[in-house]
Amino acid sequence: MTYPFISPPNAGRFALCNATLPAAATVGFDAPAIEGLLKADIVITNGVISALLPAGETPAEFARSDLKEGMVWPCFADMHTHLDKGHIWPRNANADGTFMGALEAVRTDREANWSAADVWKRMEFSLRSAYAHGTSLIRTHLDSLAPQHRISFEVFAEMREAWKDRIALQAVALFPMENMADATFFADLVAVVREKGGLIGGVTRMTADLDSQLDMLFRAATDNGLDVDLHVDETDDPAAETLKAIAEAVLRNRFEGQVTAGHCCSLARQDEQAAKRTVELVAKAGISIVSLPMCNMYLQDRYPGRTPRWRGITLFKELAAAGVATAVASDNTRDPFYAYGDLDPVEVFREAVRILHLDHPLDTAARIVTTSPADILGRPDTGRIAVGAPADLVLFSARRWSEFLSRPQSDRVVLRRGKVIDRSLPDYRELDSVVGA
């Protein structure tokens, strides 16, 4: 395998010289930045970043590769995915592209097809894709309706062990909150999540029981030492204010664990004062927010014969300005909730910049798929370039933002522990045996 711009030496110690680094994902290196980009040499010793030097200052005796100002990023963190649903589109597509169509198609497919072997095959395919793209940390939500929760969490636990040296995996139990009314089911689900080292999640809806459901959820999380990651307000209905209710419940229950809310679409449909109050509550409650811009733009405001009027995204900039931890992620991949995607954080980043207007300037944009999601997932040791960190890096020929954002960067090179990995993507034909041709 050859690359036009990089050939890392096969040596115990070598330098990547004349590199361009995103300042937002670089720690402990003081150098002038232009639009959030730094120039540096990266010294790698036995798979670990041993020094960050001003560009051109690597000692002459070091083996080296001249990147000619090509960008170097840390490996990515993808904090909201659905590995159990991935790639079922060929056998159960979403006929009309709507949210309700997605729910029904997934329900049909899950009940008919989700054996342990089926989930394993599709999940492994997704992880191979993510690894080839340069991802080292993933959180997945797992559909957790009985008896599926036991099948999926068992497969996940096996997959986490098999992939532990390549991608760190976390899992969240995803279920309708009203299912907590079945005490036997909920107790079993919590036990499975605790046993497998997962998080408790759920889909929140504006119902008369929402506050009591949230109190029950946070009590269970507290009693079992679980963090919480919820699907929230995935709708264009401005009356949907479950994010506000979640923030109030966190404060009311004095919950001390980590809470993440995904989607939060309806926040952008509410009047300014109502939205501002919710943003302030979210900040006070310490809730982290993950936006899923590609999936939300695909599903939201989709009506037959009508052009969408809005982008389906949350108030990302307002939340960040209020001090809320924010990130973006892939969400669904080739399933009824999103017909496309490949778990490629570069694609997610490029689309997020466009959809969320994260440009002008781009100084800190790189954080949304690197340091920010890594921190939210409790892994501040990943998603950044720093002395002492593993040389888990993604190298690009692009030198500046206009180059990076204008092409898919399919010629990137991924280093894990300083070694170039095989970036060959799995062939979709491998899935024909489970999802059909």
Image (cartoon, rainbow, N blue to C red):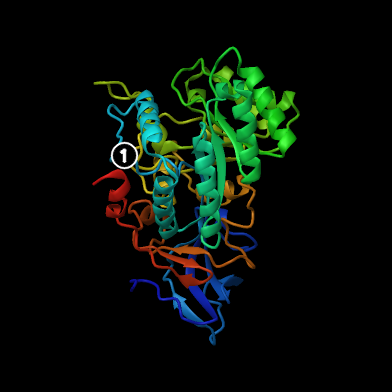
Q: Is residue 332 above or below residue 300?
A: below
Q: Residue at x 58, y 33 (%)?
A: 201
Q: Secondary structure at mark 1?
A: loop
Q: Residue at x 49, y 74 (%)?
A: 17
Residue at which label 1 appears:
89
Query: In the visual, does 301 lie left or right of 228?
Result: left
Which residue is situated farthest in the bottom direction here? Answer: 61
Q: Position of residue 408 (x, y in %)?
A: 34, 54
Q: Position of residue 240 (x, y in %)?
A: 52, 18
* Towards the viewer: 29 or 407: 407
On the question of residue 32 being in view, the answer is yes
* Towards the viewer: 146 or 137: 146
Q: Position of residue 33 (x, y in %)?
A: 54, 58
Q: Is residue 125 above or below residue 296?
A: below
Q: Residue at x 39, y 41 (%)?
A: 354
Please state the total of marks drawn on the protein image: 1
Query: In the visual, does 427 lie left or right of 332?
Result: left
| Circle 1: residue type | Trp
Query: In the visual, does 126 lie left or right of 222?
Result: left
Quarter holding residue 399: bottom left
Which residue is situated farthest in the top direction here? Answer: 208
Quadrant in the picture for the N terminus: bottom left
On the question of residue 143 being in view, the answer is no
Q: Position of residue 402 (x, y in %)?
A: 37, 53
Q: Is residue 275 above or below residue 383?
A: above
Few, some or many residues within 10 Å of mark 1 (<14, 14–19, 20+) = many
